Image (cartoon, grey):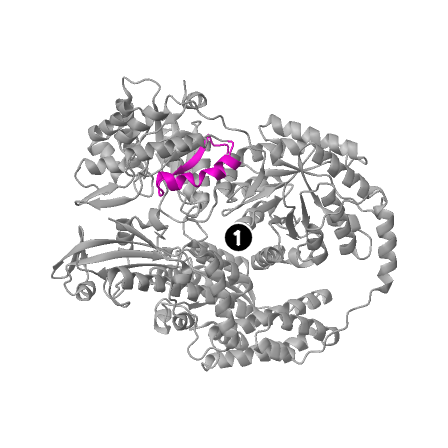
Amino acid sequence: MTVKFEAPFAELEIDKNEAFRYAGIKGEADESLNRLYEKAYELLAESLKPKAVYKFYDCTYFEDGVIIGDEKIHSQGLKTFLKESKGCALMAATAGIAADRLINRYSLCEPSLALMLDALAAATVEALCNKMCKEIFKVSCHRRFSPGYGDFPIAYQRFIIDELGATLNIGVTLTESLMSAPSKSVTAVIPKDV
Amino acid sequence: MNILEKLSKEIIIFDGAMGTMIQSKNLPKVPLPEIYNLTESEVITSIHREYLEAGADVITLNTFGANTLKFSKEELKEIIDAALKCGEKAREGFSERYLALDIGPLGKLLAPFGDLSFEEAYEIFAETIRIAEDRADLIIIETMNDSFETKAAVLAAKENSSLPVFVSNVYDENKKLMTGASAPAMIALLEGLRVDAIGLNCSLGPEKMLQVLPDFQKYSSTPLLIMPNAGLPKIIDGKTLFDVSEDEFVKAMEKATQMGARIVGGCCGTTPSYIRKLSKALKPKAFREITKKNHTLVSSYTHAVLWGEEPVCIGERINPTGKSKVKAAFREGDLSFILSEGIYQQKAGAKMLDVNCGLPEIDEKEVLSSTVKALQGVTDLPLVIDTSDPVALEKALRVYNGKALVNSVNGKNESMDAVFPLVKKYGGAVIALTLDEKGIPETAEERIEIAKKIIAEAQSYGIEKKDIIVDALTMAISADRNAAKVTLDSVKGITALGVNTVLGVSNVSFGLPLRDKVNSEFFALALGAGLKGAILNPHSQLMMSALNNPRNDSYENFAEEIIDRVMKEEGSVTASPQTASDLTLKEAVESGLVDKSRTLAKTALESSDPLELVKEEIIPALDKVGEGFEKGRVYLPSLLMSAEAAKAAFYEVKAKIQEKGTTATNGRRLVIATVKGDIHDIGKNIVKLLLENYGYEVMDLGKDVPVEKIVDSAIDYKAEMVLLSALMTTTVTSMEDTIKALKEKAPHIRTMVGGAVLSEEYAKKIQADFYAKDAMQSVRLCDQYFGNI
C-alpha cells in the first residue's frame, strides 16, 4: 500500500554544508554568504511543504538484475546495491512547485539568491529522504539508489512514479526528456526486508 | 429532464469509485484501466449498473485517463466509444439517469515548470471531448490538482461541446491545490468560465473535506459538488480497506448538504453500498438554495484578491507610456527588465499588477500574452490586462492562469461590443471608464449615468455588477480646478450604486510641481469618498501611506488649496545632502553591495564620463572578482553578488548614456538559450548576466527552446555567437541538433556550449566551437574570440 509522508520544513535536518557545496561554495563561507543562506532559508521555510510517498515490495533476483513487484529490472548496480535483500521500498520525494517558483522569481532580479534557493531546495529534498531512511526504512542515509545511478536506467523514474501514484499523490511528474517536474524531486529504491 | 433541470430540483447523487470496484473483480492485468472498456465491457457495465441500482443519478464513464498522451487517436476513439456503450447499456431500463464523460488530469506539469504547454493540454482534452460530445450528458472534470490544467480542460469542454460542465479539484489539508490555488481562487476562476458545478473530490476523507466548505459557502454562487474518499486506505489481512464506514460517510455528507452541497458522490474506496445509503439518506431531503454572492474577486494561480474591503493597490509600472526604460525594454524584447519591475512592485506592496505593452512599434497581440505568461512565472499577484486591442486581450485572457481584471471597457458601444463577449467567455472583472462617444463628461451626474449604462449592458451579457469596477477618471486640476471635485463626486455616486471603483490617480497632478504630494492627498480623499482601489506607483511612499489613511474632509476647495501649497513649497525644497561614502564604486561592486553600487554610480556620474566609469571602476572590479573565482578563492554566489552590483551600477550608466543618445554595449550580439527538452535555466541566466555586464548584447530565448527557433532568432538578430545550455544527458541531443542546424543554415555563427553534463571532449564531439566550464569562462572565451577578429 502506498503511504504518504510529510515533514514540516522546520523539522528537517538540512545539511548546510551540503547546500553550500551545491551552490559552488568549496571552502569557508564568509558572512555575506551566510546571510544569503539565511535569506533563502526564510523564503523556503515560508512556502515549502516537502512531501513523499513510498511502498514496500518483495524482491527476487536473476542473473542480470532484480525483479521488484512485477517489474524485471536489468541492472547489476541495483542488484549489488540491494545485496540480495528480500524486499525493498520504492520512494518519491519532492520539495514541490513552490521551490521552482521561488527560484524562477529570483533568478532574474537576484541570481545569487536564486542559486542559493536552488541549492537549499535540493538539500531539503535530501534531508527529507534522510529522515525517511532513518525513521521508516531504518537504514543509513546513503542506502538509496536512484534511476540514473550506474547502469540503473534513468527511465525507471517513470516506473517508480507510476507505481507510487506519485503524480496524483504528491504532484511529481516527468518531462519528455525525463527531467522531474517539480525539479527538486527524487525517486529511489531502498533495501528493506519485508 | 436534462441534468441541469434535475439539479435545480433535487440533490444529485453521483456514483462511487470505479478503480476500487475494478480491483475487487480481480480482472487480468492491463496496462491502463480504460482498456477494460474493450476487454471487460460486461464487468464495466455491471459496475455502472450496480451504482444505478444503488440510486446514483449519474454514472461516471471509465474515461479518467482516456487521452492522447496514453493512447493513439484510433485507440482513444475505440476506448471512449466502448466506455459510452458500457454506460448506455447499463442505463437501459432506467429513466433520468445521466452519463458523465470523465476527464482526469494528464499527469504532466504545465509550463513554465513542466514541459506541457497550455495549448497542448487544451488540445489533448479537446481530442477526448470531441469523441464523446454527442453521446454523453455532461462532462465531469475531476481530481484536478492544478488551476491552469483545470482551465485548459474547461475551455476544451466549452469550445468543443455544449454539454454541462462540472469541475472538481483536489484540496489538501492546507485547503489548497497541489500547485497552490486556494478555494476562493478556484471559485473565481471557474465561475468566470461559467461552469455548472464546482467542488472537490479525492485526497481527503469526508470530515476533513468539510473543512474546505466554508470557503465555498462564503464565495461561491455555483452548485457545490463533493465526492470524498472513504477515508484513508489501510491494509487488513492483506486487503486494502478504507477507514471511514458507510454510516460515517453518509453522516458527513449530510453535513455537507447542510453546508450547501448539491451534488454528492464518492471517490476512492466508496462502493455501491456507500452510494445506496447515501441516496437513501439524502435523496428525499430538501436542499439548500444557493445564495448569490456579491464579492468582487480576481485571482491568480494561488489566491484571490477581494475588492471592496481593504483598498487594492495596483502597480502601474509595467506600462511604456512615459517610461523610457520600460519602453526600451519592450522594444528590445528585454523581458527580464519587465519581470523584475513586476517583482519589485510586489515587494513594495502592490496587490495586483497592471500590464500594458501598447507601443506602436511592437506587436501587442503577441507581446501582451507572452508578457502575461512570463509574469505569472515570477509573481503570484493577480494581473490587470491593460489593452485597447480586443485581439491582444483575448489572447492574454486565454492564457491567464486565474481570473484577471480587464483594463478596460468604456461606454462606447464599440468598446462594449468588443470587450464583454470576452469577459463573458474567459471570466474576469472589468474596469469601466466613464466616457462614451461624446467624450468624458464634465459633470459627476453624467459620469454616473455612463456607469449605469455600462453596468446594464454588461448584465445583458450575463456579466454581473460585481464584476464591473468603475473608473470615474482623474483629470488634471492644473487645467480645470473643478476636475478633482467631479471625480470625487462621481466616486461617491458610483459607490452608492453598490459598485466598486478604481482610479489611476496620478493624472490629477499633471503640470504641477511636487506631483507625488498632490497625488497622495487626492488619493486619500478619494479613498474617503469610497474608492476601493487605485493604479499607482507602489514605490511612492506617500501614496502607500495614503492607502492606509483615507481622509473624509471636505474637498470642495481641494484644487485651489493644494495648487497654492505646492507652488509655495516648490521653491523651499532643497536637495538632501549627499552622505559621504567610505567606499569606492569599485569596492562596492567587489563586495557585491547592490544598493551602494547604484547610489555610488549615480553620484559618480554627476561628474565623470559614463564610459570612463565602466572602464576604470566597474569592469576592473568584475575582473578582480572573476579572477578570484577562477583561482577558487571566490565562490559562485559571491561572483553573482558582484555581478548584480555591477548590473545595478550599469543601470545608472545606461540611463546616462541613453540621454546622450549613444550605446553602452560593445556591439557584439549573442543569442543564449536552454535547449529543447531542458527546463532548467539557472545556469543560463548566470552566464547571461555576466556577459551583459561585460558589454555584450544578449538575446535570451529562455528554456526548452526548439531548434528552429534558436536558428531563426540567431539569424534575425544577426548574432555572431549562439550559447547553448543543457543539464541532462537526455537533452544534450537537442544541443547537437541545434548546432547541426546552425552549421547548415548559418555557418558564420559560432557556438558555445555549457552545462552540467558537458565536457570539452563532448563539446568537440557535437561540433561546438567553444566549451565553457563555467560562467566566467564563457566571458573570457567571448572576449578572446571577439578580441581577435
Mark 1, chain letter? B
Q: Give the extent of the magenta segment.
A: B193-221
Q: Is residue B781 above or below residue B92?
A: below
Tag count: 1
In the picture, measured across the screen, residue B359 lies left or right of residue B208, that is right
Q: Is residue B156 magenta?
A: no
Locate residue A134: give its quadrant.
bottom left
Residue B544 placement (x, y as % from top left): 68, 54
Q: Residue at x 57, y 42 (%)?
A: B298
* Label 1 crowd bin: few (<14), some (14–19), many (20+), radius 10 Å: some
- Please state which of residues B786 and B264 is positioned toward the viewer in this rendering: B264
Q: Is residue B119 left or right of residue B364?
A: left
Q: Position of residue B381 (x, y in %)?
A: 56, 50
- Counting from the top left corner in percent of width and height, residue A74 is at 18, 59
Q: Residue at x 82, y 44 (%)?
A: B555
Q: Is residue B507 above or below residue B454?
A: below
| Residue at 60% across, 33% down | B420
Task: Describe residue A4's horizontal placement relative to residue B489 as left or right.
Answer: left
* Residue sitting nearer the eye, B160 or B201: B201
The reply, left or right, for residue A74 in relation to residue A171 is left
**Residue, disc 1:** B374
